[in-house]
Structure formats: structure tokens, C-alpha cells
Image (cartoon, rainbow, N blue to C red):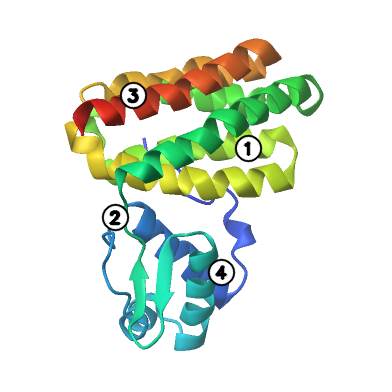
Amino acid sequence: MTAVPLDLDPSAVTSLADKAYVAIRDRLIMLAISPGDPIDDDALAQDLGVGRTPVREALKRLEVDRLVVSYPRRGTFATGMDISDLAHISDIRAQLEPLAARRAADRASRTGPAELEELALRIEHLDVGQLDRTELMRWDLAVHRTIYRAAGNPHLEDVLIRYDNLATRIFCLFLDRLPKVDEHVGEHVDLLRAIAAGEPDRASDLAREHVLGFERAIRAVI
């Protein structure tokens, strides 16, 4: 079973700047570019098969996303990470992830639960032990992106994508030390099915516990 791409709607990538943004964001989220690493825009442009201008436009967007940081006369670097990031990100996600899940569940009867149910089934049959880190993280991202989109609020979706990206960087950093990754992935199944069944209270509770459980799991191995 192949992984789902980070962007669930590839048709949205219409420009060279969009292409560069998605590709560089992917590398930053998955730690192919490590926290604190310098960003070589010339090398990225050559590697991605685009000019320097699209790469520079992408880096400006990624700075807004807090995935890179630029310093005068020093250049651009992948944003670093420390333990305070986990607390700040979890604080926001613990409020907004349940809201997105609730809204998605409220809308499920009108928009149709088929996509959510299908994704739940695919997650349920994943052999987590056989997935590499990148593929596992793509599935995790795919679940959250699907829920955000199902909530039907593009502004909420934009904010949650940004903070889910930051949380995924932390997840990747500690993934090899987490003992119960399969349980974390499995939690998605119940969450997706609660949303598909139109159960907003249960979906909200499951989403909140999913975020808080993630924070506890990371803190336990730090």
C-alpha cells in the first residue's frame, strides 16, 4: 500500500513557486533538511529543476510557516527546535484540533462520510512496522489534512496545517524512540469513524486526547 502525498490535491500545485514550496516543505517536515541546517537556494533550485526565483518565493512562504528563518548577511536556515516548541504547539492544537473534528462531524451527514470511512479502513490495515519514517508520517499528515478539509473552514484549515507541520517535525525527531507508534496511528481510525458517523462530541474528545497523548509520549522520551 503506497503512501498518500502531503498535498492531498496535487492539482493545487500550479506554479513553479508552489512546486518549490511543497517540495522544500516536505524536506523540512520530514527532517531531510535538519533543524538549524543552512538552506542553499542555488542547490535546491538545481535539485528541483526550477529557477532561483521560485525557490526564494517558496522560502518566504516557509518563513511565515516558521519552518525556516532568515538572518541579514547570514542567510536562511531551517528553524531549530526545543522543548518549549512542543508545549506551545500542543497548546494551540489541543484547542483547534477538537474544533476541526467537531465541525467535520457536524458536516459529515451533508458532505458524505465515504472519504473518511475509506481512509479509516486503509489506516486500519496498515502494517506500521513495515513502514519507513517518511511513509508513516505521510499517512499521519493525510489523516489530519482530511479532517481539516472536512471541517469546511479554510481559515481554520490553514492554521491547523501550519501547526501540524511543526508537530510533525517534532514527531520525526523522536520517532525512533517512541515505543507505541502503532497505537498513535491506530487512534486515527476511531477518530475518523466518529467523524464519519456524525458524532461531534466523541470526535472532539478523541481529537483532544490524540494531541495530548502525543505530547505525553514525546515528553516521556525526552
Residue 197 drawn above or below residue 181: above
Amino acid type at image mark 1 = Tyr
Q: Earlier along the polypeptide chain: callout 2 or callout 1?
A: 2
Residue drawn where x is 22% and y is 31% of the image: 130
For label 3, the crowd category at 10 Å Cα-Cα, with few meaning under 14, some 14 to 19 and many 20 or more, is few
Q: Position of residue 119 (x, y in %)?
A: 52, 28
Residue 1 versus residue 59: which sits nearer the camera? 59
Given residues 65 and 73, the one toward you in this image is 73
At 45% across and 87% down in the image, what residue appears? 52
Q: CA distance from mark 2 to mark 3?
A: 22 Å
Q: Residue furthest left?
A: 177
Classify mark 4: helix, strand or loop. Answer: helix
Badge 2 amino acid: Leu
Q: Give the mark toward the camera: 2 or 3.
A: 3
Spatial separation of the CA atoms under disc 4 and disc 3: 35 Å
Q: Which mark is residue 3?
A: none
Is residue 32 at least partly visible in the picture? yes
Considering only order in the chain, which callout, 3 or 2, is on the residue closer to the N terminus?
2
Distance CA(mark 1)–CA(mark 4): 20 Å
Q: Which residue is mark 1?
A: 148
Question: How dense is the environment of label 4, judged by Cα within 10 Å: few (below 14), some, or many (20 and up)?
Answer: some
The quadrant where residue 145 appears = top right
Q: Which mark is residue 216?
A: 3
The residue beneath circle 4 is 18
> What residue do we see at 51% from left, 14% from top?
190
Asked if labels 2 and 4 touch by Cβ distance under 8 angstroms, the answer is no
